[in-house]
Image (cartoon, rainbow, N blue to C red):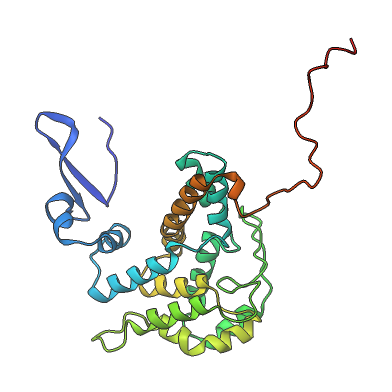
Amino acid sequence: METIHTRIWQEEAEPDNSFAAATCHCHGYDVYGDLLVHASWIEYLFLLFRGEAPSTQQARLLEGLAIALANPGPRDAAVHAAMCGGVGGSTSASCLMAALAVGAGASGGAREMRLAMEDWLACGTDLALWQTGLAANPVADPADVWPAPGHPAGFDPHGVRCATPVRQTLAYLAGLGYGTAQDCAPSLAWLQANRASLESAAGLPLAMHGVAAAALRDLGFSPAQGEMLHLLLRLPGAAVHALEQKDYGHKNFPFFRIELENDPGPANTSHAGDAA
């Protein structure tokens, strides 16, 4: 009998049906007998990834980040990809796969989240290390499938100044640790205090990726987990925009609509065989 090896999940089969689970435990917690009654979705998500229950402050921090990332809006390339799938009549799965594919890269995507979190591991809260790293040109890894990013991870390559939602998110998340017995957001607080210096070193304004990377570091997630969470947490916005555009139809799609001033109309094929 083959055995699935996992530290995350444990099941016990029903006595009369070995294909159905009688109990399910996630990192030791009874999912349907305990978590379903007492845990929130965010607390369960934290438990799945971290293997332990979050504190109240950690749950609030992850929930705030999830709200900030849930819908990046139609300006975002991943959401736009899902909208294209929806207006074109693609299946729901195809729309979400389009959003995942477009939102996976190193420029505005999940890979950038991973790179930003790796920068936090390398630099911590040492401003001098950050300034040196941000001034260096990115180098491509020949063993990696990803090309070298064209800008420092976590900063907006097209921005003129830090966008209002980014500043609002940073201020809110950084403030969650204040007044508690143990500050749960030290990286966010440091980022809030040193944002101007970091932006000056990068020559670019801070982006939402930079805020999210600091938050996920404070929550104890690894760069690989941060990359996966970035893909997951942004799917709600892609889903609802795809559904909305499917209802509107292609004639109302706001992008790349072609209007012909001298439309000849449908081709006339009634005399196609005359030349023969």
Outermost residue, left side: 15
8 left or right of 142? left
Residue 104 visible, this orientation: no
Which residue is depicted at the point 72% across and 48% down? 258
- Quick one: which residue is furthest to the top in this view? 276
Q: Position of residue 227 (x, y in %)?
A: 47, 60
Quadrant of the image for the C terminus?
top right
Quarter the N terminus occupies: top left
Residue 94 in the image: above or below residue 124: above
Instruction: Give the left or right position of residue 64, taking residue 71 as reference.
Output: left
In this rendering, is residue 243 above or below 201?
Answer: above
**Which quadrant of the figure has residue 179?**
bottom left
Count of picture labels: 0
Q: Is residue 142 visible?
A: yes
Q: Position of residue 154 (x, y in %)?
A: 55, 72
Q: Can you say whether 267 is above or below 62 in the image?
A: above
Residue 241 lies left or right of residue 144; in this view the side is left
What residue is rendered at 29% in x and 73% in y?
60
- Determine whether, in the image, residue 222 is placed left or right of residue 2: right
Residue in the image at 69% along x and 73% along y? 137
Give x and y (percent) for residue 238.
48, 54
Q: Is residue 142 above or below residue 23?
A: below
Residue at horizontal 42 percent and vertical 81 percent from the top: 188
Residue 19 screen position, x and y as percent: 20, 31
Foreground residue among 120 and 33: 33
